[in-house]
Image (cartoon, rainbow, N blue to C red):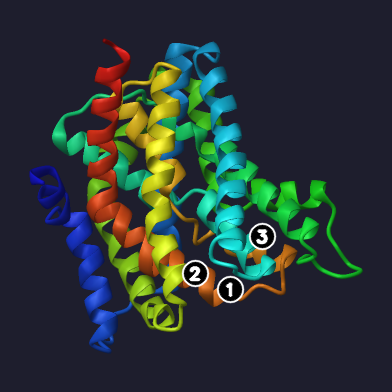
Amino acid sequence: MDLVLQNIISPPILFFALGVLATLLNSDLKIPDAAGAAIAVFVLISIGLRAGVSVNQVGVGAVALPALLAVITGILLAILVYSVFTGIVRLDKANAASLAGHYGAVSSITLALSLVYLDNIGASFEQFVPALYPFMDIAALITAVVLGRIGGAGQNGKNKTELRLIYEAIVSKPSLLLLGGFIIGFANGAEGTEAIMPFYALIFPGVLTLFMLDVGLLAGSRLPGLLAVDKKVFAVGLILPAVHGLIAVILATVIGLSPGGATIFAALAAGASYISAPSVMRTAIPKANPSLSLAMALGLVFPFNVTVGIPLYYQAAQLVSMLFTR
């Protein structure tokens, strides 16, 4: 509980709350689109660079198994979400597939906050784990699209090929920036990035608070959409992040990641995308209601993860690690 409270009153979360409050009060507080885009670019490049430098130090072989696990996890989570929403909640297949894509894909800001949280409590973790983002994200999105098409929720007569959808997922802003930063960090290593790393590492926490303020403004605008969500959909949508996080913690611990690394892997699995998923799902499954998925991702999953979820995953990772090392 102390860790949860410490996380809730941390500057990034309070800036997020400030953004939500500003929206609810109809304040004129806004972050210009150009500034918000620049802040997002900085955060994503910073994460990618540090992950690339880490892989350069430990070697590609150390990342091969975690990357494969990330792909498998992304596929399994998308299937799980789709099955739960169609089987238990009886949601239509189009919206179920869209939610599968959003819940299975990765939230870059949840990933960033998990890193900040671990740094704040002094927990160590494998620096390469954030580089698993694109593997899980793309696997989940493609799986959700396939499920939607199997269920008849895809476009009629003008479907994009799977290769085109994979391409769009890879070149989406978060994936491209993380991959680009990762490749640059990997190619140059610690010595080659020594001159620029202070810029991306030292001011990262401060820039992140601005990012959280911007996300809070966006999340606040999506809160009214939750009022129209069916109670069953709402309840299941709130439970799923914790389930995803626990599954990810167990899988990550099995392959040897530390509690800190397992926490980041859980943050990847438990987050709901509001950047890459909407664009892909809107194109591939036009019958789905985009407002439903965005309201769930921003108004429900994100607040849960950044307040309670991340500390919960860390505690679960410590417990599971203890059980596996006995």
At 24% from the left and 19% from the top, the residue drawn is 322
The answer to whether residue 171 of the structure is visible from this angle is no
Residue 178: where, in percent of width, then height? 51, 41
Q: Are marks 2 and 3 in contact (CB under 8 Å)?
A: no
Q: Are marks 1 and 3 in contact (CB under 8 Å)?
A: no
Name above or below for residue 115 compared with residue 317: below
Which tag, 1 or 3, sits closer to the chain's start? 3
Tell me the number on the disc at residue 294.
2
At 66% from the left and 45% from the top, the residue drawn is 170
**C-alpha separation, residue under disc 1 versus residue under disc 3:** 11 Å
Secondary element at tag 2: helix
Secondary element at tag 3: helix
Residue furthest toward the front?
A: 88
Going by the numbered disc 2, the residue's amino acid type is Leu
| Dot 2 alpha-carbon crowd within 10 angstroms: few under 14, some 14 to 19, many 20 or more | many
Residue 13: where, in percent of width, then height? 21, 58
At 40% from the left and 45% from the top, the residue drawn is 243
Name above or below for residue 2 compared with residue 127: below
Quadrant housing residue 27: bottom left
Q: Which residue in the protein does label 1 denote?
A: 290
Residue furthest toward the bottom?
A: 26
Q: Are marks 2 and 1 in contact (CB under 8 Å)?
A: yes
**C-alpha separation, residue under disc 2 versus residue under disc 1:** 6 Å
At 24% from the left and 27% from the top, the residue drawn is 319
Q: Which residue in the protein does label 3 denote?
A: 280
Foreground mark, 2 or 3, reads: 2
